[in-house]
Image: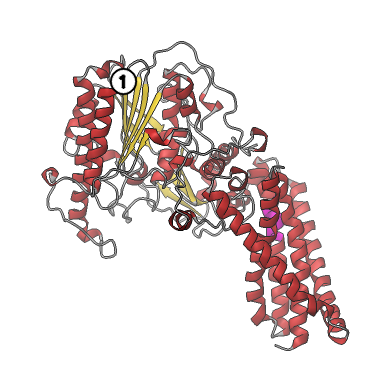
Amino acid sequence: MTPPIYSRLRIYLALNFLVSLLISSFYLLFAGSHPLELLFTGSALISNTFMFYIALALIALPLFWLTPARLLFAGLITVFQLALVTDAAIYKIFKMHLNPMVMNLILTPGGLNSLDQGFWVKALFFAILLGLIALEAWFYRLSGKLAKEDLAGPGVIKKRSAYILGVLVFFLLLDKLLFAWGSAYDIVYITKNARLFPLYQPFTARTFIQKYFHTRLDKPVNIKLDVKSSRLDYPKKQLEFGPADKPNIVYIVIDSFRGDMMNPEVTPELWAFSKKAVVFKNHYSGGNCTRFGIFSLIYGLYGSYWFQFVAERKPPVMMQALAELGYDFRLYAGTKLSFPEFDRTCFVDIPHSKVYDEPLAAGKADKDAEITGKFIEFVKNRDRKKPYFAFIFYDASHGTYEYAPEYERFKPSVPSFSYLTLNKKKVLPVFNKYKNSIYYDSNLAMRIINSLSAGGELKNTAVIVTGDHGEPFFERGSYGHNQGYPPEEIKVPLVLYWPGFKPRVYDNFTSHFDVAPGVLRLLGAKNPPSDYSSGTDLFKPEPRDFLGAFSWDTAAIVKKTGTLTMALEAYRLGGVKVYDADYREVIDKKAPAAFTGDLLSFQKEAVRFYK
């Protein structure tokens, strides 16, 4: 590459970098004023913009060899600048960055008008586009002129380029190290801004710090975010309680426990117990993986809020209310509650002394048996002057589907299998292995329930048995959770025993979002669920058109007539898809239009608890 061309590219990128930096500065309006926030967001602004331009420079290097290709790159960078402006506008309206869900809502006929954004918004958009085209044309000419002058003169621009590049690298390192430090030591003024900038790439080093600095990072969170600095408006109103009974509350969650496994063959003892309880036959998790399934169960909120809640270490209303009502807490899990980060979300205020999530046993099945024994031991020796809340999470039915040998009820089964070679023809033994693990964990759940019953504890103890998500076995083409949103993946059992309640079966559409509001109402909460939840009262359900379900970067609108899935991040391919009632993809470009009203309601709920 000849020096004049290289110099022109350098100047052209530098001019555009300043414009991008100016546009992206808009996001700082959504950050707080704490000194650590200002330091982090300022460095992240420069760092994130710099990373964009590293990618743009790599694209530009081969294109600038040919004059026509330079014009192509100028067009590309115009689109990039327009995307930044569009993203900033979308962030202001939706509190989320440019993604297929938002674009579908905007581009669907009537979608933009439904947001009260009509002709003048479109006119402004085209005016900005024309302005950017004119600006890029001027930058292109100006860069050529300045490059010639610099090469003919003292070469000031060339000499200062290395210095400027060094400054940018400094801010890149500062940004990443600040976030790694903030994430490791729960500096919420840093972590809460992790998703402030589009496509921001956080850097974490918790494992490295624990290993080489010999420090535990699962200690209670000590730094609490000032309410004024929070980006969350949660709850909308503080809860008020009237007089009500305060029974002990036991949550038993079996990993990957899908809805149709709740039957006399797979879970015979639990099935028999359910005849004494309230059963919800059409119940859905709020997510297709553990993270969002448990989050929806405890918070009663859309999974899209997870990222901000974990960033701010914001506890759930239900757990705070239980603490204020005088409940003791005990958490038992067959796997660490620090990944997913439930110790930073659902149970952030629970002292580590109340948590038993590192069983000494070797295998998953033995770990689940161990935590069962630990809970039963706690109940026998507990302080009976105060009620308790217990959360028991079984892990043996997750992934490798483990169980004690005597629980091999379904055959043929396999001792182990390869995910890589598994297919529909080979899946039966693996499916049987899964059912055996569910049979095993359901029997552990019944060991707890029978122990409570034998000790007379069920007279004043509520028991909730459910799953965090389901597990498909090629019934509709996919295997394993976190793949999509068919009923095998998100429909889960819900058995609720509450002292004094008559057995009943609910057939209506219910969700994990409804569980926390239902429990709080039974404990005397006067507030409507909308003050703190995306759900409704489990026992007094309001009419709903759809249920939401979430994963890392996708979500779904689930209806009885069909399902719409969408990407929530710009990098996620696939966009928006529609499935019929049997979860078969509908190949029709007009199909998403039928969900426009639902998308609008979904989007409003997805940002309702943001300021």
- Residue in the image at 69% along x and 54% along y: 86
Q: Residue furthest bottom?
A: 2
Question: Around disc 1, counting alpha carbons within 10 Å, would you say few (fewer than 14), some (14 to 19), or many (20 or more)?
Answer: many
Q: Nearer the viewer, residue 452 or 69?
A: 452
**84 in the magenta segment:** yes
* Residue 547 falls inside the magenta stretch: no
> What secondary structure prevails in the magenta region?
helix
Q: Amino acid at mark 1?
A: Thr
Residue at image point 36% right, 23% down: 388
Q: Is residue 99 visible?
A: no
Q: How many marks?
A: 1
For image coordinates 68% across by 62% down, the residue present is 171
Asked if residue 70 can be seen in this view, the reply is: yes
> What's drawn in magenta, residue-wise?
82-88
- In percent of width and height, residue 481 lies at 35, 50
- Side (left or right) of 208 relative to 480: right
Residue at the disc numbered 1: 461
